[in-house]
Image: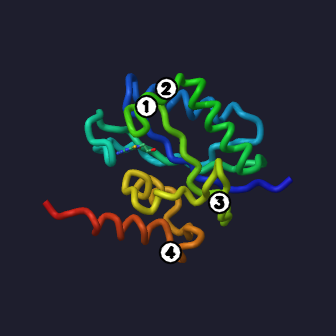
Amino acid sequence: MTEAIAYIGLGTNLGRRMAHLEKALRRLEDRNGVRITQLSSVYETAPVGYLNQPDFLNACAEIKTTRSPMDLLHILLDVEQELHRVRRIRWGPRTIDLDLLLYDDRIIQEEQLVVPHPRMTDRSFVLVPLAEIAPDVVIPGTGQTVAWWAEERKQGSEVV
Ligand SMILES: Nc1nc2nc(S)n(CCO)c2c(=O)[nH]1
């Protein structure tokens, strides 16, 4: 069975943030058919969207997997539950957020699952860590690489 390459976005802004990231990665690694093959640095980032919440720690991981995209989504949701992710406010603080960003060169638009992640090209907190581990990956449907999008979004941010 061939392995697909997928990229996961990790975020946390509640409690012992580093511990949550480490635990989520361990739980992912423990799952059959999932291997973590690259991990970005961890970045401290100001919240975007819902601003009235603590700063996040964000990172991205490359995984090699024999699991389908839908199976992988359910594994991510399981790990979020194992870390007692409570969804109080939709955009509010969370112990852990695991987003499936890319799955090979697939474009998936299903009720439960949209890949590439629909907001990833707007988010420096995703693009910067992802460009660290996968700069030359082309984001399907955009014709541009992760590094290109990261640069694009950096230029988008105002000069202070
Ligand atoms: N910096 C930053 N801001 C965010 N706003 C939301 S919602 N999120 C959760 C995205 O899934 C984040 C995040 O992970 N990092």
User: Which of the marked residues, 4 or 2, is nearer the chain's N terminus?
Assistant: 2
The residue nearer to you, when weighing 108 against 79, is 108
Mark 1 touching mark 2, by CB under 8 A? yes
Q: Which residue is pictured at 62% across the width and 35% down the height?
A: 77
Residue 144 badge: 4
Tag in front: 4 or 1: 1
With 103 as the anchor, is 18 left or right in this view? Answer: left
Cα–Cα span, label 2 and label 3: 26 Å
Where residue 90 appears, as percent x and y from the top left, is 43, 37
User: Which of the marked residues, 3 or 1, is nearer the chain's N terminus?
Assistant: 1
Q: Secondary structure at mark 1?
A: loop
Q: Quadrant of residue 137?
A: bottom right
Q: Return the residue at label 2.
A: 86
Residue type of the residue flagged with mark 3: Gln
Residue type of the residue flagged with mark 2: Val
Residue type of the residue flagged with mark 4: Gln
User: Which of the marked residues, 3 or 4, is nearer the chain's N terminus?
Assistant: 3
Q: Residues within 10 Å of mark 2 (few under 14, many from 20)?
A: some
Where residue 80 appears, as percent x and y from the top left, is 57, 31
Residue 109 badge: 3
